[in-house]
Amino acid sequence: MDERMNGVLIVGAGPVGAVCALALQQQGVTARILEAQPQDARADTRTLALSHGSRLILERLGVWGRLENVTPITRIHISQRGALGVTRLSADELKVPALGYVLPYAVLTAALKQALTEAGIAVEHGVAVERIEAAADAATLHTSDGRARAAPLAVVADGGRGDTAPQPKFERDYDQMAVVCDVTTELPHAHQAFERFTPQGPAALLPKEDRYGLVWTASKADAERIAALPDAEFLAALQQHFGGRQGRFLSAGPRKTFPLKLAFTGSEAGNRVVRIGNAAQTLHPVAGQGFNIGLRDAWELASLAGDTPPGQIGSSAMLAAYARGRRADVIGGLGFTDFLVRTFSNDFAPLRHARGLGLLALESFPPLKTFVARRMMFGARG
Ligand SMILES: Cc1cc2nc3c(=O)[nH]c(=O)nc-3n(C[C@H](O)[C@H](O)[C@H](O)COP(=O)(O)OP(=O)(O)OC[C@H]3O[C@@H](n4cnc5c(N)ncnc54)[C@H](O)[C@@H]3O)c2cc1C
């Protein structure tokens, strides 16, 4: 049965899809969401790092104030193992309350879910979109419940995991995986994050409530081995890898791994269909860019829809304007992240020295440091 509906249809109630629905409603545009997971799905355990720019988006949607367990990052210490060169970023220097915020994915999605309910935005749970038919005047979404729903615009925010994903336009497999878990250290974090570049890949410690969220990048084979180590051996290996800046590592929670790659699919997906968030681009987490770019995708798309006459929402002119408007931010974020991963994940001596000089230059030339930090916080409009 083909059900013709008014308003925008969003595929996926992850953070990007939910933010898009709320922002569309703020612009006076009706949206509904189809979510593959059941209503009572088990909460995901990943940790997210939000930029200051993402906080501003969530504030405007009235979601920020509902978030609990948010840990501000007020300083970031960046170094490379076995070589000179350290740079430090601080919120005071940049005149912002925090450089970023760390919170559990489940906390953000729960707050967004509540905001959607209160805003009266319909979310159909347990409905997976299996196929999208793009036509000149509407997109038709065929779903796992055997129904078809049509809309003038379909926004795909399925995290790139859905069956509807086209081949990426550009893909790079870094042969790296992230081992993630919570860890405690002898010294309190005092809201400082660490990013340490090593030839095997970057390792980050993100202050998270009374502990740290660890993101340890390694080759695929090493990551599986590291993740499977018993606690005592894992902590000893981490100590050796990370050094003693925070004293001893005392405990580690359950380890999880996830593959790291760059995949750029882009927003264009045919008539009346647009892809946003991880569905449009997947980035290595080294610079904390991917998730924040996704939120900006959602915000910018909704703002543009609000400026578009109702009969033109989803038109090829609107979708082309969206793609043009997002290009600099998305390509900039992809390029910056890819540059960091490829420049820092090796032990080639001349590069190691150049990297040291780069970190020193950043440290001793405040305008450059401000430029890089603002880029990380706000994207191309920083
Ligand atoms: C395993 C893993 C671990 C990660 N760990 C980290 C981390 O530690 N730190 C970090 O900053 N980032 C991490 N990321 C990246 C981060 O999760 C993403 O940047 C962020 O979640 C993107 O938000 P999104 O809303 O675009 O997609 P998602 O959060 O993936 O949400 C997509 C939603 O769409 C739904 N969906 C999927 N297919 C369909 C369909 N066919 N029909 C209907 N609904 C559908 C899904 O159920 C989900 O609810 C991780 C990503 C993955 C895959």
Image: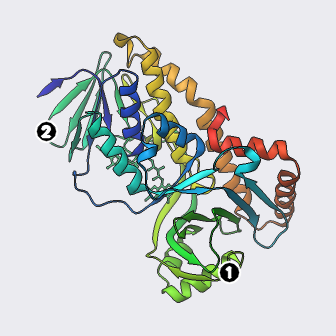
**Residue 124 lies in quadrant:** top left
Report crowding for label 1: few under 14, some 14 to 19, many 20 or more residues within 10 A (C-alpha): few
Residue extending furthest toward the left: 1
The span from disc 2 to disc 1 (Cα, nearest Å) is 57 Å
Q: Is residue 72 above or below residue 158?
A: below
The C terminus lies in quadrant: top right
Give the camera-side residue of 233 and 75.
Answer: 75
Looking at the image, residue 182 sits to the left or right of residue 29; the answer is right
Give the camera-side residue of 358 and 365.
Answer: 365
Name the secondary structure under disc 1: loop
Q: Is residue 114 above or below residue 228?
A: above
Q: Is residue 243 above or below residue 259?
A: below
**Residue 327 lies in quadrant:** top right
- Kindly identify which residue carries mark 2: 146
Q: In the rendering, at what x and y percent does residue 192 appear?
A: 66, 63
The reply to whether the C-beta atoms of the residues labelled 2 and 1 are less than 8 Å apart is: no
- Kindly identify which residue carries mark 1: 247
